[in-house]
Amino acid sequence: MFDLFKKQFIDVIEWTESTNGVLSYRYPTADKEIQTGAQLTVRDSQMALFVNEGNVADVFSPGRYELSTKTLPILTSLLNWDKAFKSPFKSEVYFFSTREQLDQRWGTQQAITVRDKEFGVIRLRAFGTFAYRVEEPTTFHQKVSGTREKYTTAELDGQLRSIITTGIATTLGEAKTPFLDMAANQTKLSEALKESLDHSFWDYGLKLTSFLVQSVTLPEELQQYLDKQSSMNLVGDLKKYAQFQAADAISAAAENPGGMGMLAVGMNASGVIGQAFGQGLSGDSGAKQEDPFVILEKLQTLMEKGVLSKEEFEAKKAEVLKRIS
């Protein structure tokens, strides 16, 4: 009988996480009372919360505590305890895991509609990963986990996915930067979405520690446009590109006897590169300059006849090429 009576009192309160994905755990106190002076152990990456008849009382960060009126000031006030109170008491105790919940998956099961300032209404799919942790146990207890014996990431997953999907549509719809500019840089897109989602997570007592966009699937016509835009960026300034190509061709042809004549025919047949050469040679728009092909042919002839040395030819050729670069 004495042993049975003794079991009604709790002397040690602690929680050892046995599985991953548990966000909150209610310590079993049914039909039991907590002994004044009992030891509360809150491990690293945990927090503990005392609740009395639905009223949130004291919160404990990692450490070891001896439970008394001194360490339970809010509960003492709620129950009107005297400072010399030594009797056993009733209270619910909840533990919360504050470890980061890593590699959480998110994705848009259905295409979401986004209004873009450049392309109007577009539909897209996206997916990636995120991580979060319980930051404010009082808020999490009141808004999410409640009095459940155990609350897991799996139970919260659906709500977080809804928050993310809504956040994506809202953020991209209000963004000043065109969507395609952000989609081309997934790092910036991830940062923009995380910033917009931070507040929504905090409303539930959670801290969003990372948010990554791994893939964005666009409508086919927009994907083709993005591919073309990327190609144009690689080419850059087409005028300078054409001038560079032409100068490189002259340099190669000058190394081969007879090559200048064939090059001239090819250059005259190319409207784009020919125009680039004309612009490159127009240092003085009012004065007509001699054709560089003719100059290079003459220089090569002089070198072949021994009038110019190889070094002199290279120096003169460089002067001509400098005028058109």
Image: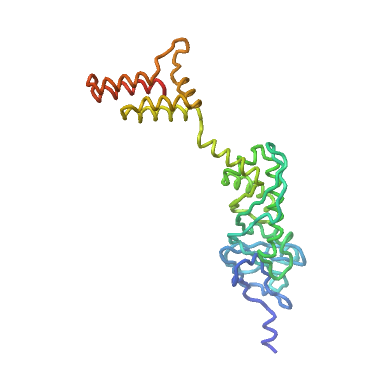
Q: Quadrant of residue 101?
A: bottom right
Quarter of the image with the N terminus is: bottom right
Q: Quadrant of residue 116?
A: top right
Left or right: 229 with respect to 292?
right
Q: Please state the horizontal and vertical placement of residue 161, each as a whole percent of the image.
A: 69, 56
Residue lying farthest to the top in this orientation? 286
Q: Residue at x 46, y 20 (%)?
A: 278
Display colour scheme: rainbow
Work out whether residue 143 or residue 129 is closer to the camera in this orientation and state it: 129
Up-down: is 176 above or below 197?
Answer: above
Q: Please state the horizontal and vertical placement of residue 246, each as a whole percent of the image.
A: 42, 28
Work out whether residue 67 or residue 255 is closer to the camera in this orientation and state it: 255
Up-down: is 250 above or below 222?
Answer: above
Numbered label tally: 0
Q: Quadrant of residue 318?
A: top left
Up-down: is 117 above or below 205?
Answer: above
Q: Please state the horizontal and vertical placement of residue 143, each as a whole percent of the image.
A: 74, 59
Left or right: 302 with respect to 33?
left
Left or right: 209 with respect to 108?
left
Residue lying farthest to the right in this orientation? 53
Up-down: is 21 above or below 173?
Answer: below
Work out whether residue 293 or residue 129 is closer to the camera in this orientation and state it: 293
Quarter of the image with the C terminus is: top left
Residue lying farthest to the bottom in this orientation? 1
